[in-house]
């Protein structure tokens, strides 16, 4: 026997996922492998402040989107009063990744 057809499905292309229902955040992109866990900040200003304090001046700040809403919290400890997500998020290059909790993608 020989298979005759191979098919693929894209939830975005087929309209099963709403491409406009994304939460926005910001990460300091250190160029680590895709799927690495990163802090997600509520504002670009918060991300920039964290970047400067950690000496990451050469790392760009990138917008990220998540299919689930971020739950924001205030930082404490060494760097106070930053608003960031209550979990680290796995960051992917685009929306084509296996769905799961605490995952986001670069908004470009």
Image (tube, rainbow, N blue to C red):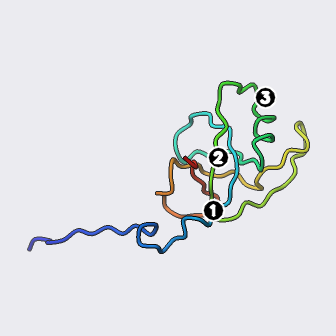
1 or 49, which lies in front? 49
Give residue 82's position: percent from left, percent from top: 85, 44
Do labels 3 and 2 touch, CB within 8 Å? no
Q: Quadrant of residue 14?
A: bottom left
Q: Which mark is residue 88?
A: none
Mark whose residue sits in front, 3 or 1 = 1
Name the element at disc 3. helix
Which type of secondary structure does the marked residue at label 2 adopt?
A: strand
Name the residue beneath numbered marker 1: 22
* Mark 2–mark 1 distance (CA, rounded to whole Å): 12 Å
Q: Mark 3, mark 2: which one is toward the viewer? A: 2
Q: Position of residue 52 (x, y in %)?
A: 78, 28
Whole-number angstrom distance, CA of label 3 to CA of label 1: 28 Å
* Numbered marks: total: 3
* Vertical placement of residue 36 versus 5, above or below: above
**Residue at the location (64% across, 46% down)?**
63
Question: In terms of depth relative to the viewer, which is nearer, 107 or 73?
Answer: 107
Q: Quadrant of residue 72?
A: bottom right
Residue at horizontal 27%, vertical 69%?
7
Q: Earlier in the sequence, mark 3 or mark 1?
A: 1
Residue 3 location in percent, x, y?
Answer: 14, 71
Please report the residue visible at 57 percent of the width from the left and 34 percent of the height from the top. 31
- Placement of the N terminus among the 4 image quadrants: bottom left
Please give the residue where the numbered disc 3 appears in the rendered image.
52
Image coordinates of residue 21 in percent, x first then y, are: 62, 66
| SS type, badge 1 | loop
Q: Residues within 10 Å of mark 3 (few under 14, many from 20)?
A: few
> Which residue position holds label 2?
63
Q: Residue furthest left?
A: 1
Ranked by sequence position, the earlier of labels 2 and 1 is 1
- Report, in whole angstroms, how far the alpha carbon at label 3 lies from the one at label 2: 17 Å
């Amino acid at each position: 026997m020989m298979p005759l057809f191979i098919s693929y499905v894209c939830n975005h292309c087929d309209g099963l996922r709403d491409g406009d229902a994304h939460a926005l955040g910001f990460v300091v992109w250190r160029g680590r492998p895709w799927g690495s866990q990163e802090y997600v900040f509520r504002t670009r200003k918060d991300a920039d402040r964290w970047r400067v304090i950690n000496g990451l001046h050469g790392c760009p700040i990138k917008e990220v989107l998540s299919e689930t809403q971020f739950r924001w919290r205030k930082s404490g400890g060494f760097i106070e009063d930053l608003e960031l997500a209550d979990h680290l998020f796995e960051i992917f290059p685009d929306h084509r990744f296996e769905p799961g909790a605490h995952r986001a993608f670069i908004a470009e």
